[in-house]
Amino acid sequence: MKAISGKQLCRLLEKKGWDRKTINGSHHIYMKQGKKERISVPVHGNKDLKTGLLKAVIKIA
């Protein structure tokens, strides 16, 4: 799986219909109407996210 940054993941989620509800420190919180889950994306500049987090987000989204 190709590594991506938190900023890139945020852009992808927004394209897929997820809405950023709040920012708590460096974590962007996304929710989507019709889903109970929420996704927390750590945005630390252009630092790549770990593959485990990416897999978990893909499973939810």
Image (cartoon, helix red, strand yellow):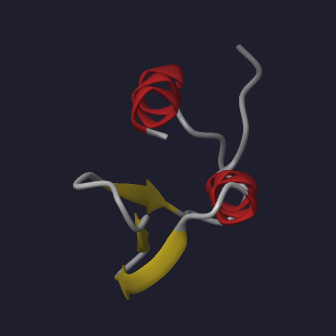
* Residue 19 as seen in the image, left or right of residue 16: left
- Hey, which residue is sitting farthest left in the picture? 36
Residue 53's image quarter? top left
* Residue 43 as seen in the image, left or right of residue 23: right
At horizontal 66% and vertical 51% (from top left) the residue drawn is 9
**30 or 2, which is in the foreground?**
30
At horizontal 66% and vertical 50% (from top left) the residue drawn is 47
Q: Position of residue 5 (x, y in %)?
A: 69, 48
**58 or 47, which is in the foreground?**
58
At horizontal 46% and vertical 57% (from top left) the residue drawn is 41
Q: Position of residue 1 (x, y in %)?
A: 70, 13
Residue 52 in the image: above or below residue 53: above
* Residue 48 as seen in the image, left or right of residue 61: right
Residue 16 in the image: above or below residue 22: above
Residue 33 in the image: above or below residue 57: below
Residue 4's image quarter? top right
Q: Position of residue 24 (x, y in %)?
A: 31, 82
Q: Position of residue 60 (x, y in %)?
A: 39, 36
